[in-house]
Image (cartoon, rainbow, N blue to C red):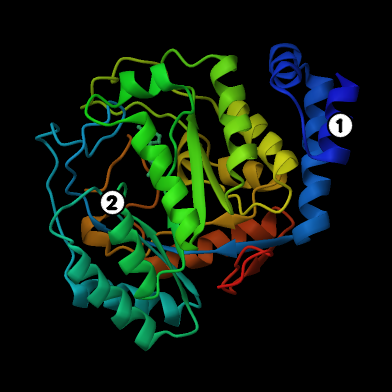
Amino acid sequence: MKPILDDLYHKNESTPERLLYLLEHLDSEAQELLFSYSHQTRLKHYGRQVYLRGLIEFSNVCGRNCHYCGIRRDNLNVDRYRLSREEILACCREGHRLGYRTYVLQSGEDPYYTDERLVELITAIKAEFPDAAVTLSLGERSYDSYQRLFDAGADRYLLRHETASEGLYQRLHPDSNFHDRRQCLKYLQEIGYQVGAGFMVGLPGQTHEDLVRDLMFLKMLEPEMVGIGPFIPHGQTPLAEFKGGTVEKTLIMLALTRLLLPEVLLPSTTAMGTLDPLGREKAIKVGANVVMPNLSPVGVREKYELYVGKICTGDESAHCRVCIEKRISGAGFEVNMGRGDHPSWRR
Ligand code: 5AD
Ligand code: FES
């Protein structure tokens, strides 16, 4: 066990066999060593800095039917909303006032937001806040569309691969295609975005082999950002009766990701804070270095319910800003309100 962890720490690489052995045999002693190595690695590249991004969930309309997701097309109980350009800009303004220099625009796959509308939106945000980065999280689109949004000024794109196992992917995404999604990630890299991939931990039927595949896929893709969170069942989805992922297993995957991709921007996700009041702090302590507090208008927050119990739905953006700073400094880290680009990135 120790040689596997030492290799990860010193060379930032491993093999599928070794990672599988590690996941199968990790006892509390080895886990402690893993977490101390991942923490050391973050200190080396980022010190105690934690970057904040403001998340704007601007539409919960979605054309997809992912089995795990609360805003899937077939969930007729969702009160669907779309924010207007002015409403989104108002969120950015509030965010800017609170110090945020990255706005993450996230939505379901909503056809209302055509390239034309998005280009107009991105252009307006960039004109008003030239010092801020725009991150998109809009799902799968065409190469041409990604290119136009990039040309309008978008800096980064989040598109989790969700799972790197084809069989599991197809079972969870009845009307999507495993290869299409990977192709999208390639397109985004080719165009020049800073790209975020990532996966869920504890999906129904997910094995250690599947998780190893996720890690190896990330190592191969080398994205600038990686989003990892526990699967949390949502009552109005086909997976309502399944068990969710755990904080502990997610922490292990975060730590391994920090070791395999030492400079990666790695968020401590809201799903972690949902499962455990101290989940986000725990993630930061094992190597996560980004937090994405909500900037959406409070009136729509509850409607963007990907999973049950999502935190912060009743809290004003200003409240979250203060709350998260307290949590980060309470855990012994420092908030960094800069753009927080990946160290290797040049536009
Ligand atoms: N539990 C945890 N994460 C979820 N996501 C969607 N539904 C759930 C759920 N039930 C994640 C997906 C998606 C991201 C925006 O949220 O990984 O990419
Ligand atoms: Fe929203 Fe703590 S981050 S209330």
| Some atom of ligand 1 lies within 8 Å of the CB belonging to the residue at label 1 | no
In the picture, which quadrant includes the C terminus? bottom right
Cα distance between the residues tagged 2 and 1: 38 Å
Q: Which amino acid type is shown beneath numbered disc 2?
A: Arg
Left or right: residue 148 versus residue 117 is: right
Left or right: residue 123 versus residue 320 is: left
Residue 252 appears in view: yes
Q: Which amino acid type is shown beneath numbered disc 1?
A: Asp
Identify the element where label 1 is drawn.
Answer: helix
From the top left corner, tell me how far across and down residue 37 is, in percent: 83, 39
**Residue carrying label 2:** 141
From the top left corner, tell me how far across and down residue 74 is, in percent: 13, 31
Position of residue 313 relative to residue 153, above or below, is above
Looking at the image, is mark 2 or mark 1 earlier in the sequence? 1
Q: Residue at x 68, y 64 (%)?
A: 344
Mark 1 closeness class: few <14, some 14–19, many ≥20 residues within 10 Å: few
Tell me where residue 58 sits by quadrant. bottom left
Identify the element where label 2 is drawn.
Answer: loop
Mark 2 closeness class: few <14, some 14–19, many ≥20 residues within 10 Å: some
Mark 2 touching mark 1, by CB under 8 A?
no
